[in-house]
């Protein structure tokens, strides 16, 4: 389970299944719940819903829910599996809607729904996925998931809207960047742990610690994701490369470079970022400079700092193999690039 | 309250407020609940959410919820007002998403969200409206709205997907057309009455009768809407005209014309419909022929038949001024054109 389980490859899907091997049976239960939640599609929507459900990738969030339930002293019961499936389905629905008019043509090497069936169909199918997620939550006896997750979805969406409103603004600061990724990414990681812990019967303290672990893990995950957009390649990341650049998205490598690593000073750096957003040559040149200036190393360090915070949250969690597994997962998330 | 309250105008928004005058105080409560449900928007999303909420039109569904609650012997209590607000919000959210890539530029004389802020923002704001609706339902003590309305949303969406999949197919039959509008329109009218009745404390029988009334009213509403697309004008209907034609939507006037009123026989009629979908001249010529052949009168009769069915559902409902008001509303819906 420790370090040796992760091969040298930087592919996120190559190492993780081995890391998650101890959870195979639990993840099977979540998979069953996930399919059951989506089982009732109409004949006209069935193909599209199934296509969307294939986006289902690393199963990192469901794994986190299962581990949290076990740390609370529970098996992966039906409510735990359903709650974990709901969180994954919410993630899938946001992916379907994110692809609309983002010109993203490849997601985990499968054509996006909007390219294959059109934008309007993609909107409706995403809406169906959300409605099935909310429905499954509503039928749980304990209304916690229904209440908490509808709040979380709002936070995720507001994070995305925030990101859109500052699109092509090269002046936003690190704090605003962190506020955005807290909503659009970290909130759902936190939720994966919180619902697992809750339906596993955790007390508020354990729920809080595990939720905080999820928050910091999600922050690290997004920071690494933003860094991979600069340095990764399409084959290993499985999505179109340099999308952030072409979309005018301000990410941590750019912010750190602008605010300290750029030799030409802040004003010139801002101009260089704008240039990179409008030309491929400018983007490639800037990517080289981010590397050379040390901005990428500082980004890695920021991700590592979030992982350290995540691991610190585990200190109050009782010693157990599942606690070690959370640590392994956390270290895996940064090893995607380090 | 009876017939005299409705002026001769064919404008749907001109007559209805008078018809609904007895419900002014109730509708105020629903309006408060609706605004409260949307109150927590983030600074970045607030303007867009408020803009979307302005689409709020005739308040027909909230009125139906209030009347249903009163027929169950209840005041418009907080849960009734919230449930009514949720149904209206679901309607608003579907409108926001319907406008995406449907090239609809005007909705109730306000620029659509996607034209003003872009498709991606419209997707996200629609998602936020849905999340707030589900959230409000989740916080009601009685989980009925949460469970029932997440099902209803699925039915509405599947109706829309069904409609999209048969787009530009001039051969679909009346039964399939009815199946589509049952989902995309009638299900939410039915829901407006069902939740009002439920949170007003109605027994299952009354809930069933009022729900069935709502179903038939919704069917009539959509049939009339489809007819207005052929004959109405933008000023009175408040939305772009002839949209169904330009989108290749098969509506009841076309189906009835093709299957009985067209003098040239079915095969030639199918070709004429395809022509109307691809050229403005063809569409205008066909509109004249629909009128001349009697297909529009047959469409009106079909709407009237649904209203008659709706009124028949009221027969088992105890005599009360609110029951008469439902009758008035039902007759108003067809009088939009007759």
Image (cartoon, coloured by chain):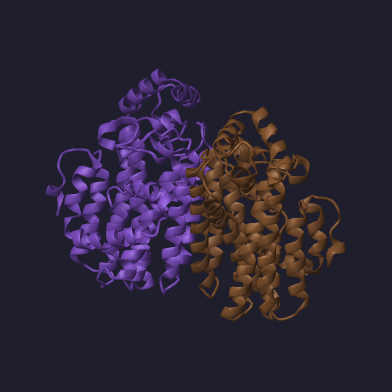
Chain colours: A purple, B brown
**Residue under the image location 65 percent in, 30 percent down:** B282
Location of residue B86 (image quadrant): bottom right
- A332 or A76: nearer the viewer: A76
Q: In the rendered image of this protein, does residue B162 appear above or below residue B118?
A: below
The quarter of the image holding the C terminus of chain A is top left
**Residue under the image location 49 percent in, 68 percent down:** B147
Q: Is residue A300 left or right of residue B306?
A: left
- B312 or A224: nearer the viewer: B312
Q: In the rendered image of this protein, does residue B338 appear above or below residue A206?
A: above
Locate residue B305, reporting x and y percent: 67, 61
Locate residue A201, reporting x and y percent: 33, 74
Location of residue A106 (image quadrant): top left
Q: Can residue A179 be seen in this snapshot?
A: yes
Task: Report the residue that reaches farthest toward the top.
Answer: A281
Q: Is residue A100 left or right of residue B133?
A: left
Locate residue B173, reporting x and y percent: 53, 49
Q: In the rendered image of this protein, does residue A170 appear above or below residue A7?
A: above
């Amino acid at each position: 389970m420790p370090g040796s389980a992760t091969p040298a490859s930087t592919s996120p899907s190559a190492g993780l299944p081995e890391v998650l091997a101890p959870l195979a049976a639990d993840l099977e239960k979540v998979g069953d719940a996930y399919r059951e939640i989506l089982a009732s599609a109409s004949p006209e929507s069935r193909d599209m819903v199934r296509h969307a459900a294939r986006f289902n990738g690393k199963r990192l969030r469901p794994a986190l829910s299962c581990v949290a339930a076990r740390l609370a002293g529970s098996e992966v019961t039906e409510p735990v599996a359903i709650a974990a499936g709901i969180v994954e389905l919410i993630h899938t629905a946001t992916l379907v809607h994110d692809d609309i008019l983002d010109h993203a043509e490849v997601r985990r090497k499968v054509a996006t729904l909007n390219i294959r069936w059109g934008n309007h169909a993609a909107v409706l199918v995403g809406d169906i996925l959300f409605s099935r997620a909310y429905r499954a939550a509503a039928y749980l006896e304990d209304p916690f998931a229904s209440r908490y997750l509808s709040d979380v979805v709002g936070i995720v969406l507001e994070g995305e809207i925030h990101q859109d409103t500052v699109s092509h603004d090269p002046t936003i600061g690190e704090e605003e960047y962190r506020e955005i990724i807290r909503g659009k990414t970290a909130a759902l990681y936190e939720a994966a742990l919180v619902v697992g812990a809750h339906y596993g019967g955790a007390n508020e303290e354990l729920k809080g610690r595990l939720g905080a672990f999820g928050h910091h893990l999600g922050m690290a995950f997004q920071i690494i994701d933003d860094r991979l957009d600069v340095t990764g390649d399409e084959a290993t990341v499985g999505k179109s490369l340099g999308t952030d650049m072409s979309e005018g998205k301000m990410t941590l490598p750019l912010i750190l470079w602008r605010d300290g690593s750029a030799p030409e000073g802040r004003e010139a750096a801002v101009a260089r970022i704008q240039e990179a957003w409008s030309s491929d040559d400018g983007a490639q040149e800037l990517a080289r400079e981010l590397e050379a200036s040390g901005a990428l190393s500082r980004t890695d360090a920021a991700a590592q700092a979030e992982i350290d915070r995540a691991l610190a949250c585990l200190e109050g969690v009782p010693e157990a193999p599942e606690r070690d597994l959370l640590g392994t997962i956390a270290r895996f998330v940064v090893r995607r690039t380090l």
